[in-house]
Image (cartoon, helix red, strand yellow):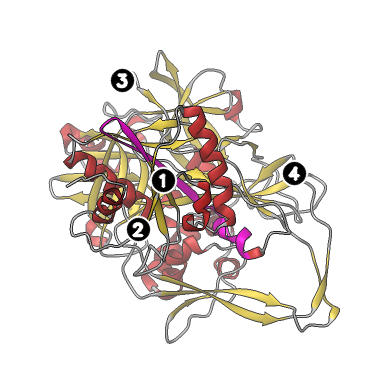
Amino acid sequence: MGPVKRVEFSYPRSDLTHPDSGVARLSGNYIVWSYAQIRHNIRARSMPLVDVYFRSLKKNVPSAGQFVSLPLSSIPHYRIGTIWRRGKCVSDTLMQERKFDVDFSPEGWSLTSRLELNQMGMGHIFADQDYPLHYGERDSMKLINFKLPKGNLLVSCVDYFARAYARNMDVCRALTTLKWSDVMDVLYEDPRPSAHQWLVKPSRRMRNYDAVYLAHLMYDSYTEMRTKKINSQFASRSPLQKVNLEAEPWFTGPGTLECRGKWINGGKTFLCLDLVGSSEPIGEDIQWQALKFDSTNGKEGAGRLVMPRPLRSAHAEEFLQEQSYVEPDKHSEITIVKAPPFKALGKRRKVVKTKKIVPSDKGRLGPNPPRPDSLADGDGVGSGKNVGKAEHVAEAKLESHGFLRDIWNAFASLKKCKKNKITRLDWYTPTDGFSSSEPAKVLVLAPIENSKIPSDVRSWVYLDRGTNQLRGLLVLRIQIASVDYFCFETQRKEIEGDPSSGRAGLLMKSHVSSEEEFSQFVEKLSSSIRYKKGVFKNMANFFPQGFETFNHTQKDKQVRYRNRLIGAFRKLGVELV
């Protein structure tokens, strides 16, 4: 084996540690190499454990390894190829990244393992010399073997389950720890399907980013069959038995997978070491109906005692300690821990979100739970441990259909076509400064803590109030004829048929003489724009004279929004045609 090449992470990540696990005792540099079996956690039944194989690095060359048990819910943080030292993730490694068109129908794939391939005389497909595993040619780790036109694609069943089934790891945890009848009660407020539409009534623990999977689980018998097979692998085992997980694609038809990994078998097989994206199944619109209790006309004090459970999102790079063998307190704060993003490839499924108003009496509000010292991703049990609930969620990283991504693409297209005019294109965040690297990053707006501010203004800062996902501000610098121009765009909710949703961007000529001065300007802008709900036109006095706001249109034949940007520059006296 040759040396691995270390690279920076392409996404903001939580500084997550498991101080009670074997990872904390890895004193040198260790690379996550492979996933193995899953087993019940005897000390915390709602938190199954995965055996993860780490190899030590000697001058960046993988050498001797050892297994470490980690909670299933944290597997997306321990991506194959990440490097860890004394419990902390310190680096990513360079891999080839490819998209593959695959067939998710049964005829497009099969389950296999290195052991089975050798028994069938096909060991060359995944030979130990190409990627050495702890058990060598006898390794029984299950893989999905997708057919390709001139070869095949191998994907770990553990990786596929943890990344491509649900973004909220609470779903995966429920499937591996509960009886099937209990699974349905945990996932749905009402598990009975509608006869007329794909209506999903989720439990309060479910989030709308898993609407597609949860809808198919309820209305698609194929999804139900594949999911029940996973559940039965754990329900039929004794607590001491390990499970060699068989996780199969949960929908049928053509689709796309995006993988990081390496070519093996003489370039005929792509070994996916890190699954980073998948397409969704096509189908009917999904109705996502959450409950909202309204006590406006209810009797005072006649309702139940409500124990508040604050919900917050961990900040990027926030230090978090998670327990592996202790479950959270029953009444505790919920912290959403952002796992590495998982791309939604291709066309997105339409999900219509509604609320069912339930009249209720006015209850009494109990005390807030204390701020926890550590976190755990299990079912709440007991009290007094000061252990909060962790909810691991992989954000949907839109392929190139997200609005801000389309704006970046439009500017990049202009720069490519007008090299003689546009000499630089950079994005900006206070942490990174100016950069032209891909993908472009956004500045995340801060929540408004002042309760005296109108609720609609405070809510605007969030893209999704249910998950506390905050909006971003895209800041771009475009250099034309040695003159800098800045463009500002706020992130918006994607609305079917009209993702622009009546909002406008702003383009202006630079009025600053240094990056420090610009940093101060952006800091004030990112604070003020929140109170205007993203409408730059309502901040006219904030910007120097000569700025231009512009609405968006999708009528550009080749690159979305490009013609609109050309028009905005024209109004500033700059011709790009």
- Return the residue nearer the eye: 174 or 486: 486
Q: Which residue is mark 2?
A: 249
- Is residue 525 left or right of 145 when viewed as pictured? right
Crowding near the residue tagged with mark 3, few <14, some 14–19, many ≥20 C-alpha atoms within 10 Å: few
Q: What amino acid type should be assigned to the residue bearing mark 4?
A: Pro
Q: Position of residue 421 (x, y in %)?
A: 21, 36
Q: Kindly indicate whether the residue at mark 4 contacts the one at mark 1 (C-beta within 8 angstroms).
A: no
Q: Which residue is mark 1?
A: 159
Q: Kindly indicate whether the residue at mark 3 contacts the one at mark 2 (C-beta within 8 angstroms).
A: no
Upstream in sequence: badge 1 or badge 4:
1
Q: Which residue is mark 3?
A: 1
Q: Can residue 376 be seen?
A: yes
Upstream in sequence: badge 2 or badge 1:
1
Q: Kindly indicate whether the residue at mark 1 contacts the one at mark 3 (C-beta within 8 angstroms).
A: no
- Is residue 508 left or right of 47 when viewed as pictured? left
Crowding near the residue tagged with mark 2, few <14, some 14–19, many ≥20 C-alpha atoms within 10 Å: many
Q: Which residues are magenta?
A: 456-485
Upstream in sequence: badge 3 or badge 4:
3
Residue 322 drawn in magenta: no
- Return the residue nearer the eye: 305 or 157: 305
- Real-space Cα separation, disc 1 to disc 4, in angstroms: 30 Å
Q: Which mark is residue 396?
A: none
